[in-house]
Amino acid sequence: MRFLTIILCFAVSLNTLAARKRELASIKEDERMVHAKELMGKGYKKSVLRNAEHVEFLEQSILKTVESRLPKKYKNRAHDVTEAIIVEANKHGLDPFFVMAVISGESSFNPEAKGPVGEIGLMQLRSSTGKWIAKLSKIKWGGEKDLKDPVKNIRLGAAYLSWLREKFEGHGQLYLAAYNMGPKNVKSALAKNVRPKDYPIHVMKRYLAFYKSLENHKI
């Protein structure tokens, strides 16, 4: 009887340990809100984003979205991908829903996506950009294969977004455009009094849709 009790206790301990290992990092709520307000400006107060201020379990909402969007062969990586989105967003003061919107707009959550000019993976980074941002951010660079790994891709993509955000002084439309067309091209456009808007609109629609789905409990 005592032996059986020991076995049962051991099994419970293993299950508890496994559950802890699968726990997701917590979103830094204050930083999420700061970034959300930065992106929305005066429109924040009347947006669906404000309704998320008192919503619990946002992490699980992101996990459900990732699980539903990843291709079948990658669904076993859903927890790792979600963890990467949250951890890297926290690290750089980004809204994880924003990071997720960029992923959606760039690759539709396909880790094997390839762009017309060499973009790779979830956040569609070129190898040259990956290598450069890895060096700048002191992230070990293993070559193009790193961009094919969804977690490493997110780590590098979030770092690049953060760098662009600082470069364009928090102007969401500009650093989003720069993510798509490069900072030099954005500066050239601004010199001609043109503010690129197509790509920012493309991403922000997805950003708002994620929050709308959250509001409607559809995520």
Image (cartoon, rainbow, N blue to C red):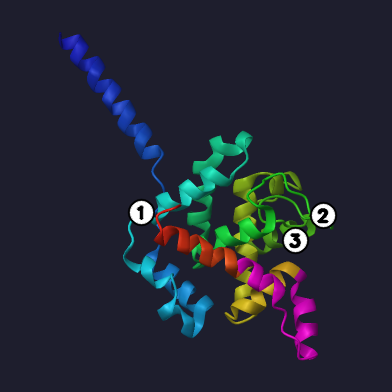
Residue 81 on the magenta segment:
no
In the rendered image, residue 50, in percent from the top left (x then y), is placed at 39, 72
The foreground one among 184 and 50 is: 50
Instruction: State left or right for residue 168 relative to residue 126.
Output: left
Instruction: State left or right for residue 28 relative to residue 174.
Output: left
On screen, residue 187 above or below 22: below
Q: Which residue is mark 1?
A: 57
Q: Which residue is mark 3?
A: 129
**Residue type for callout 3:** Thr
**Residue type for callout 2:** Gly
Tell me if mark 2 has few (under 14), some (14-19) or many (20+) residues whose alpha carbon lies within 10 angstroms of its own. Answer: few
In the rendered image, residue 83, in percent from the top left (x then y), is placed at 49, 49
Q: Secondary structure at mark 1?
A: loop
Nearer to us: label 1 or label 2? 1
In the rendered image, residue 205, in percent from the top left (x then y), is placed at 59, 67
- Main SS, magenta region, reads helix
The foreground one among 83 and 131 is: 83
Nearer to us: label 1 or label 3? 1
Residue 56: name its quadrant. bottom left
Residue located at (61% from left, 54% from top): 154
Residue extent of the magenta highlight: 181-203
Residue located at (76% from left, 91% from top): 193
Residue 175 visible to an observer of this rendering: yes
Tell me if mark 3 has few (under 14), some (14-19) or many (20+) residues whose alpha carbon lies within 10 angstroms of its own. Answer: some
Residue 149: name its quadrant. top right
